[in-house]
Amino acid sequence: MKIASSFFAGLLAVFLLSACGQRQEEHAGEHGHEAHGHEAHGHEENGHEPVAQEIPRGPHKGRLFEQDGMGLEVTIFEDGVEPEFRVYPTLNDKPLDPKAINLTITLERLGATQIIRFSPKNDYLLGDQVVYEPHSFSVMLAARYQQKDYAFNYDQIEWRVVLTPEQVKAAGLEILKTGPAVLADEVELQGEIRVAPNSETVVLAPVAGVVISAPVSLGQSVKAGEVMATLESRELADIKRNYLEARERLRLAESTYQREAMLWKEKISAEQDYLAARSAKAEADINLASSRAGLMAFGLGDGELRALSLDQPGNLARLVLRAPRSGRVTTRALAPGQRVTPDSALFTIADLDQLVAVLSATPAQLEGLKPGQVATVAQVNGPVSSKGRVQIVSPQLSEASRAASIYVSLDNPATWKPGQFVKARITRTETPAAVTVSNESLQSFRDWTVVYAKYGDQFEVRPVRTGRRDAHRSEILEGLSAGQEYVGKNSFLLKADIGKSEAAHDH
């Protein structure tokens, strides 16, 4: 049975692809853009039927139209810019000032008309609109030069197939219409309870030393400025001694400077002596400021610096660590007599009144999540639950898990403890969308997301810009209008056929 089913599917695909032979080749433009099989018609003023003819190429590789010596070379330029028409006018095969030409191009697309007007730029006429994809249309040029009207047209068809109703049915193509819908769904994520960002602080050892005392215990509440530990450090003693020496040198340098300034003013001493004293004072100022900044980085305040004295050498090695913020001590990693190294984590202080649920979201789950959305947070394998709101959606993925963190604030944080595992359901915004398509209709084509639009018995690639989506439908922001017929299920069959022409497409 499986063999028979596969054989039938193969025959169906061959039938569909062989039926799609009424596709014309790609458009022409600048920079190697080629077109095959397009026809051009020069509209004569005597009213005779236009005659199909080969379209010659101009020096810019564009289509060249000529009548009574006046020529227009039509290109679609897209090197570093959005596709745009550039038309080069000539007179008797020589460049013609574009300011002398009034030109309009009308594009008749499937289901739409685009009118492009032109203005002179450099040696060509530049269209005032982007020639949006697909470049599949009938082109009508209307030009006026020296009180005479000229008209040319040609067809440029690409990424289009023709199917009869019978062929559509045999291929199993689902024909739908774009329309409004309410896009909404819930996403379930898992994570844990943590202290809110910026609500905890790690207290580090600023220097190497030995713990003399640590009066604060694990779980204790502390206030900002409260003593947490006392260290004894030889390195700190040396830094304090250098500070005291720098302070004394500055005192002497200031005294010398004042004396030399007075002597120089009274012309008793040379100016050189005065300048040397001023330089020595400036150097002493810098040295003292540097030593002072180093000590303040260890947490010493102005009062402690003023109290330093070489008469009490025992105090030079002592460093008092104070709580940088109020909160609860959630980690404690020291004991009296313990030797610590610089940047050792000694305590963590956290504000346990500010807890959040930190959830993990894959890239697919991230879509539609934003701050302010309502979330229901529940304990894993437990009865506790509460409401909250999305607070932060992380802008980047974790390198380890390839997932983003979602922070949900909690209405009753006292119910929770840091470290509890939780799950949460977040309701994404339920808002109506004016134009939507089924998710099955969306395909990738070149660098675009596309839908295969239906116009009678013709099917054409339509690049679209999508917006919100749920499990079944996607919002269309650009590319399709409301009420447009398109292919839903099995649209990949059209992609397979139209994609064959892409190999020859010099876009």
Image (spheres, grey):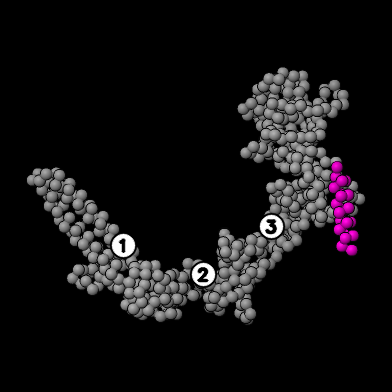
Taking the image as shown, residue 368 lies to the left or right of residue 167, namely: left
Instruction: Name the image quarter holding the N terminus.
Output: bottom right
Does 180 sit above or below residue 401?
above
Circle 3 SS class: strand
Q: Disc 2 residue type?
A: Ala
- Residue 411, numbered circle: none
Judged left or right of residue 158, residue 99 is left
> Residue at horizontal 36%, vertical 72%?
340
Q: Are marks 3 and 2 in contact (CB under 8 Å)?
A: no
- The span from disc 3 to disc 2 (Cα, nearest Å) is 30 Å
What's the magenta region?
1-21
Q: Is residue 58 visible?
A: yes
Label placed on residue 294: 1
Q: Are marks 3 and 1 in contact (CB under 8 Å)?
A: no
Q: Are marks 1 and 2 in contact (CB under 8 Å)?
A: no
Label whose residue precedes the other's in the sequence (3 or 1): 1
Whether residue 446 is situated above or below residue 414 in the rendered picture = above
Q: Position of residue 243 (x, y in %)?
A: 24, 63
Give the quadrant of the C terminus: top right
Q: Amino acid at mark 1?
A: Gly
Q: Vertical placement of 119 versus 68: above or below?
A: below
> Which quadrant of the structure image shows residue 250?
bottom left
Q: Nearer the viewer, residue 280 or 338?
A: 338
Residue to which mark 3 is pinned: 468
Q: Earlier in the sequence, mark 1 or mark 2?
A: 2
